[in-house]
Image (tube, helix red, strand yellow):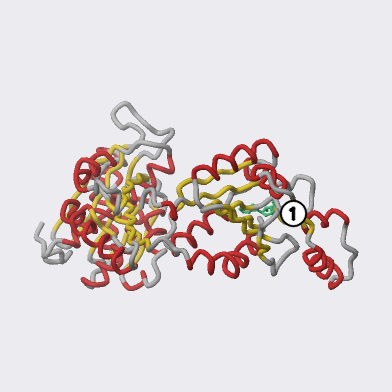
Amino acid sequence: VKNDINSRVEILAVGSELLSPNFQDTNSLHLTARLNELGYSVRFKTVVGDELADLSYRLKQACRQSALVLVIGGLGPTTDDITREAVAAVLKKRLVFQPDLLERIEQRFRRRNMPMPESNRKQAFLVDGAAALPNRNGTASGQWISFGKKNIVLLPGPPHELKTMFEECVRPRLERRRPGYLARRVLKTVGLTESQVETLISDLYPKTGNPAVTVLASPGQIEIHLTAFSRRSSALAVRRLRGLEEKLARRLRAHLFSVAGETLEEVVGQLLKKKKRSLAVAESCSGGLLGHRLTNVPGSSDYFLAGVVAYSNAAKAAFLGIPPSVIERHGAVSSVVARRMAQGIRKRARGDFGLSITGIAGPTGATPRKPVGLVYISLAWAGGAEVQRNLFLGNRDMVKLQSTQKALDMIRRRLLLKSAGGKAIPG
Ligand code: AMP
Ligand code: MG
């Protein structure tokens, strides 16, 4: 994947608005996806404001280090659009007036019964020697500039203009010189920290960097992203990926829950469906997030029966049948109450499984013996119940998210047991 001259691709997104908190450079994500399909990997991307000096500086670097530079934006008619000028200056080329481009622009205005503003004239200039890339949806012509083995491609900023121009003018040219084929795979794990994952698998990372491995952490979930490259075919890239994937899977064992993009709630849903088991949930500090995640999955009515958000002690008594004396003795955030919640909802919903969450999401509500992030999670089935005590770090949102992640993982692991009937396992 590394250092193949043809795959030395970089993207420069131009526009001061992209450096403000209000706009995102979405075009480069779109371009990256298309480039990957064509076997190119992106090595760098930069956002540059509408400053001639800044853009020239980054362009010079880009031309030195990359074989293909895609420049997005700054091709408009206004004074802040300076991409043409910057590229011409860096390459020491003139900007050449193109009568046919001007004619096209004037035509667009005529069709709308408007005179062409003088400022649009600058869009009729090409860097000397560039090929014009027609713009079906706007007045900004794209440009393809080749010199030696290097290529600079100028593309318009408005996303629909860029997408169409890429498909019609850029893709065919890149296809002809494609460096090879990329294949990607995402392995998702739960129940391990980032460094535990690293320790478990890092000796399997290929020294060649092909496949390339990156480990990404998010709350309650560590993802391992694999990218393989083959010069010859996509089948070979996929095969390369498979070999590594199998080795990783043997190491990660039951911590690995997804290899094809599925979410944890989808995996739990598939297992419940396959085993013909039903689930009901009782939530306190997660406030319905567990039920929300489970019901985000299409077809969840096949196995999801009910969810109760029993926030107050009175609600835990009324909806789950937990005697107030039990809550008083142990506290609402306790192993005993978590278990009673899971058993209570299981019984009332007549389900195979009951799953419950009770804890302190913070930032308030902590006591010396019960810190923020203390969460009890319980799973109940016909023959018994288990409870886990957790200490989650992070803010309120993170505690809620990690609680649901852990709850989903508890039922997933039980469903993976051979005898995981929810009925068959004796307490
Ligand atoms: P420009 O070609 O610089 O005149 O850009 C025109 C418009 O396209 C801008 O006002 C943005 O709304 C949009 N745009 C420019 N660059 C990007 C980008 N990298 N990602 C998403 N939108 C963009
Ligand atoms: Mg702009």
Measured as percent of width and height from the top left, residue 255 is found at: 22, 52
Residue that badge 1 annotates: 76
Which residue is outermost to the front? 148
Identity of the residue drawn at 60% across and 51% down: 71
Which residue is outermost to the left? 426
Identity of the residue drawn at 21% across and 53% down: 248
Q: Secondary structure at mark 1?
A: loop
Which residue is outermost to the top? 368
Measured as percent of width and height from the top left, residue 170 is found at: 57, 64
Identity of the residue drawn at 39% across and 36% down: 394
Residue nearest the observer in this picture, 19 or 141: 141
> How many discs mark residues in the rendered view?
1
Measured as percent of width and height from the top left, residue 318 is found at: 36, 54
Badge 1 density bin: few <14, some 14–19, many ≥20, Cα 10 Å? many
Amino acid found under the numbered disc labelled 1: Gly
Left or right of residue 27, residue 128 in this image: right
Residue nearest the observer in this picture, 258 or 391: 258
Residue nearest the observer in this picture, 166 or 59: 59
Identity of the residue drawn at 29% across and 59% down: 345
Q: Is residue 20 visible?
A: no
Quadrant of image for the C terminus: bottom left
Q: Residue 285, located in which quarter of the rendered image?
A: top left
Residue nearest the observer in this picture, 415 or 129: 129
Cβ(mark 1) to ligand 1 < 8 Å?
yes
Q: Residue 369, located in which quarter of the rendered image?
A: top left
Q: Is residue 391 visible?
A: yes
Measured as percent of width and height from the top left, residue 164 is found at: 62, 67
